[in-house]
Image (tube, rainbow, N blue to C red):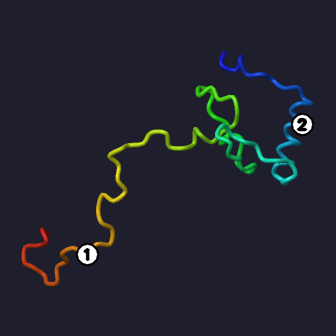
Amino acid sequence: MATASVAFKSREDHQKQLELEEARKAGLAPAEVDEDGKEINPRIPRYMSSAPWYLNAERPSLKHQRKWKSDPNYTKSWYDRGAKIFQADKYRKGACEK
């Protein structure tokens, strides 16, 4: 069973965690810090900040949300946007196939 390795919390521990999350959202407690030392915005939902189970992440992080595969051949300018190329001024017979 996949959930057998997850540690279940008691009711008191769960209440403390909820209170801490509310305090972080209100700005009373310091924000949570991820693996890289960056602060995680407390208003980011838990399902986004916690990594999927198959990544075996111990702490909340946004590293799994970032682009981890980068294509070295990718360029943003595959054509020149806004560049003026030849534009017909007159109608030429046979230009339209209809």
Q: Residue at x 69, y 28 (%)?
A: 58
Q: Where, quadrant-wise, is the C terminus in this rendering?
A: bottom left
Q: Residue at x 74, y 51 (%)?
A: 43
Task: Name the residue tied to disc 2.
Answer: 16
Report whether 87 appears left or right of 1: left
Disc 1 crowd, CA 10 A, few/some/many (<14, 14-19, 20+): few
Task: Name the residue tied to disc 1.
Answer: 84
Disc sitting over residue 70 in the figure: none
Front residue (pair 32, 5): 32
Q: How many marks?
A: 2
Q: Distance from label 1 to label 2 (Cα)?
A: 62 Å
Q: Secondary structure at mark 2?
A: helix
Q: Amino acid at mark 2?
A: Lys
* Sequence-first disc among 1 and 2: 2
Report whether 93 appears left or right of 28: left
Where does the image place residue 78, in percent across and percent down from the top left?
30, 57
Where does the image place residue 15, in percent across and percent down from the top left?
89, 36
Q: Residue at x 70, y 20 (%)?
A: 3
Asked if labels 2 and 1 touch by Cβ distance under 8 angstroms, the answer is no
Q: Amino acid at mark 1?
A: Lys
Q: Secondary structure at mark 1?
A: loop
Above or below for 16 versus 94: above
